[in-house]
Image: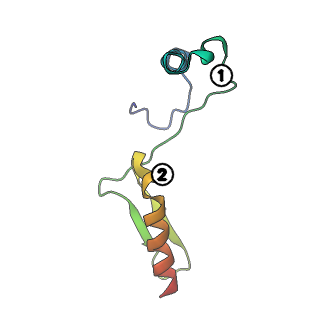
Amino acid sequence: MESAGFDRAVDPKIVDGIHHEAAKLLPRLADMKPANSWTGLRPATEIGPVIGRFGETNIWTAYGHFRNGILLAPDTAHCIAEDIDR
């Protein structure tokens, strides 16, 4: 992880390092080349995730989970669903 702002450039050295470490766990990967690579942005806020209705609109937001988005997705969905159902 690095703080790179909005730079989504892929560093080939990092990709090679990840591939090398993965091949230690699964030796069959050593002779394979990654089909593609990408970077992902992990937006965060100073206060943690922002979940809920945007003002009095019919828009609900759920952002700022940083790297825990995939872990918090079920609870976030539950919160949004409950809020919409009110």
List the single residue furthest toward the right. Answer: 35
User: From the image, which quarter does the N terminus lie in?
Assistant: top left
Q: Can residue 47 be seen in this view?
A: yes
Disc nearer the start of the sequence (1/2): 1
| Label ID, residue 64 | none
Vertical comparison of 43 with 81: above or below: above
Would you call the spot at circle 2 few (<14 residues within 10 Å), some (14-19), or many (20 or more)?
few
When the figure is inspected, residue 40 is found, relative to residue 85, above or below; the finding is: above
Q: Is residue 71 left or right of residue 27?
A: left
In this view, the residue in front, 68 or 43, is: 68
Residue at point 55%, 19% (across, down): 19
The location of residue 27, given as percent across then percent down, is 57, 15
Q: Mark 1 points at which residue?
A: 34
| Residue 53 visible within the image | no
Q: What residue type is labelled 2?
A: Ile
Between the residue at mark 1 and the residue at mark 2, the CA separation in whole angstroms equals 23 Å
> Which residue does the image show at 50% across and 68% down from the upper left?
77
- Please say if 5 is above or below 26: below
- Residue at horizontal 40 percent and vertical 50 percent from the top: 68
Secondary structure at numbered mark 2: helix
Type of amino acid at the residue the image marks with label 1 = Pro
- Residue hosting label 2: 70
Q: Position of residue 57 (x, y in %)?
A: 53, 80
